[in-house]
Amino acid sequence: MNTGRGVILKVGELFLKAGTRQRFMRQLRENARRVLAPYPEARVEKPYGVVLVRLVSEMSDERFREMLDVLTRLFGVARVLPVRLVPTELEAILATGVAEAERAVERLGRDDLAFRLTVHRANKHFRPNSKGIIEALAVALVARFPRFHVDLVSFDLNVSVEVRDELAYVYAESLKGAGGLPVGSSGALTLLLSGGIDSPVAGWFGMKRGCHVRGIYFDSFPLIGREARAKVEKLAALLARYQGGFHLTVVPFADVQKFFKKEAPLRELVLLYRRSMYRIADRHRREHGADALLTGDNLGQVASQTLPNLKCLDAAVAIMTIRPLIGFDKSDTVALSRACGFFDVSTEAAEDACSLFMPLHPQLSGKPEFLRAVEERLAEPLAALEEEAWAKREEQTFGLE
């Protein structure tokens, strides 16, 4: 009677995008296929209005739960629904609804559950109507579990039925999805990724708004140990879970830093470092066809992130820099870092490249014209060092990209 298992991916915000909805849905299906590549038992299909992941061969419950976890991280998805696919026959729908209740009783360890029923009849030719299905299913559930009782507000179990043209979906579990827009539907960004708390969360936000994100990391080895890069690589692997892969460019930056330490004003060192990073990151952006830079900057959080100093950084490149964390309290960012799974890695002990040669009193109100004058004075050797750093870059790919 039961024709198999599957997962329905319900979209939320995409329904607001009337002019581009079909393009977004195509991107979502493509992304689902990419993240499900390790699961050949699953096939992505496209019934109207949803994305259906149908199991075409046997899958253990443990592996099925693992796949659900992957799908809850897929941007563009509002709800992840593990469903039973049954024929559009009332008897099959009722039997499957009762089976879902039996699983809930086993999971919760009691049989006095408060329940509600939700029925959507997209197939208007199906009989009975939605009210009739609800009445029949309620009778079947109470006959199987006499201690069940209806509560439309405070319920333990919600058995849902969607009757479509060819199949009915029956489910009693609804998992929260990642929301946002499908990665790749809003362009591409170059993320300045470090081993701290902020930049991975900024990368996550870029992906959530539909951008494909690539990372660039400025490695200060041998001025600092290998642990810092190892942290960044771990974070890159975690970011890969949210877009089906992550590309990281590692640029050796120690020679640039040593040069500035020797030749530039001490108070301006951090701003000069970061302006150099922006210039190289902009080169990365152009090479990979990205539309903007993306950083974890937060207004006023550290010396380089005062409003005048952010203006100095923006003046280093002729492209937009997106700063999704600009108004966050640190506690807000930490909470997101924990929720996204980054926090434990971000807080691993490692030397901080940004603190190298940090002056006791760093500049809080930098002036772009002064920094440009310093860079112009050092133009020839600085350009050569930045060119050498770019030439020695290493490319790494994590996940499925």
Image (spheres, rainbow, N blue to C red):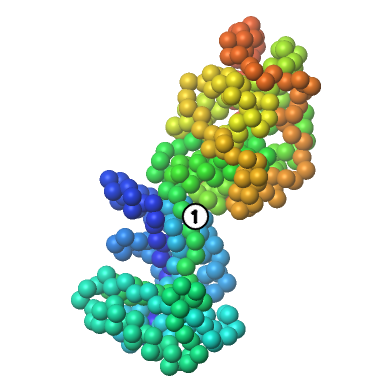
With respect to residue 180, does 376 lie above or below?
Answer: above
* Residue lying furthest left: 125
Q: Give the camera-side residue of 387 and 317.
A: 317
Q: Is residue 398 visible?
A: no
Query: What residue sits right under mark 1 in the picture?
Result: 178
Most foreground residue, 212 or 90: 90
Image quadrant occupied by the N terminus: bottom left
Disc 1 on helix, strand or loop?
strand
Q: Left or right? Give the position of 373 relative to 186.
A: right
Would residue 323 be found to the left or right of residue 92 on screen? right
**Image location (x, y in percent) of residue 366:** 63, 16
Q: Residues within 10 Å of mark 1 (few under 14, many from 20)?
A: some
247 lies above or below 179 = above
Q: Position of residue 75 (x, y in %)?
A: 46, 52
Tell me what residue is drawn at x 27 percent, y 70 percent.
122
| Picture coordinates of residue 150, whole percent (x, y) | 44, 82
In this rendering, does residue 163 appear at all?
yes
Q: Would you identify the image quadrant in which residue 312 lies?
A: top right
Measured from the top left, where is residue 271 in percent x and y? Answer: 65, 21
Q: Residue at x 77, y 36 (%)?
A: 351
From the viewer's perspective, tell me whether residue 180 is left or right of residue 306.
left
